[in-house]
Image: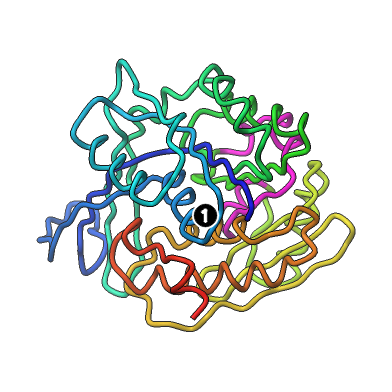
Amino acid sequence: MNKIVVLGSINVDTILNISHLPQPGETMHMEDRSTAGGGKGANQALAAVRAGADTAFISKIGKDHAADFMMKTFKEDGLNVEHVTFSETEGTGKAYILLQDGGQNSILVYGGANADVTPADVDAAKDVIKDADCIIAQFEVPIPAITEAFKIAKENDVLTFLNPAPAPNRREIPDELLSLTDIIAPNETEAEIITGVHVDDDASMKEAAKAMHDMGIHTVLITVGSKGSFYSFDSGKTGFVNAFKVNAIDTTAAGDTFVGALMAKLDHDMSNIEEAMTYANKSSSITVQTKGAQNSIPYEKQIEI
């Protein structure tokens, strides 16, 4: 059983079902709305624990009803929430998901308490990081906290996994953070933002991966939606693992499910990379068949059927 630490965000999602994205000046009716647990960090932590990993979560929430709702879910799933703390100034993060017919989504995020995560919060969780096999982070919490977590991890032979989403401008990503990153997992859009390489085929994926290897990153994973996922090691080995073909209803949390499930199964030496990616792809394929984020993330018994 892998020991995973996730440093990341908690959001309560409001899902707005629409036929298409409104044009400038257009007023349109929603088909439906619903509320669900979300946040990239929380999604990835739940994906990991549901895939069988011993998982701890470092995050921040507000002192509000939304926090009660989220903590109830975490505890029911057996997630270690010792280092999920309360912000004194901000409410729980929120996301507004515009879900179009066909399953594609656009997301607006209000950071709230997520923006209040500090290096001191990370230092308070130092022992749990030292004891982990891997730490996962995304860009929905401040970069200084991620950098501090990755420093602790690297000093203790813990794999560092960066999901660079939502991707900021490349100039906003410190070189120090990239040099501390063992595995990076952007989608094709995020890969282009980081490297300047437009990713649309095998050659451009390899070009983008090389650019990230040159930044000091050992392993590059690029997810390409319904097609599957590409991997590249700095040794020069590359490969592609096809996605499972399903009828996608809602792609929310698909990428997060991939990350959590992958790291629940990936060996420290990455020798089982294709097997772990296949497992992660299957997990994601289950997620997209249900509306919502955390409620759609599958459990190990569902994935291994």
* Residue occupying image coordinates x 76% and y 33%: 154
172 part of magenta stretch:
yes
Image location of residue 84, percent across then percent down: 41, 31
* Residue occupying image coordinates x 34% and y 61%: 105
128 or 241, nearer to the observer = 128
Query: In which quarter of the view is residue 22 placed?
Result: bottom left
Single out the residue that lies furthest toward the right.
Answer: 235
Left or right, 15 with reference to 173: left
Image location of residue 182, percent across then percent down: 74, 45
* Residue occupying image coordinates x 72% and y 72%: 202
Image location of residue 123, percent across then percent down: 59, 20
Q: How many marks?
A: 1
Chosen colour scheme: rainbow
Picture quarter with the N terminus: bottom right
Q: Which residues are magenta?
A: 169-194
Label 1: element kind: helix
Q: Vertical placement of 92 versus 240: above or below?
A: above
Image location of residue 247, percent across then percent down: 38, 82
Q: Vertical placement of 161 versus 146: above or below?
A: below
Query: Residue at label 1?
Result: 48
* Residue occupying image coordinates x 55% and y 49%: 54
Left or right, 132 with reference to 249: right
Single out the residue that lies furthest toward the left.
Answer: 29
77 or 24, nearer to the observer = 77
Q: Vertical placement of 222 versus 60: above or below?
A: below
199 or 50, nearer to the observer = 50
Give, as a three-letter code, the residue at label 1: Ala
181 part of magenta stretch:
yes
Left or right, 254 with reference to 228: left
Answer few, some or many: residues within 10 Å of disc 1's Cα (few below 14, many 20 plus, some between 14 and 19). many
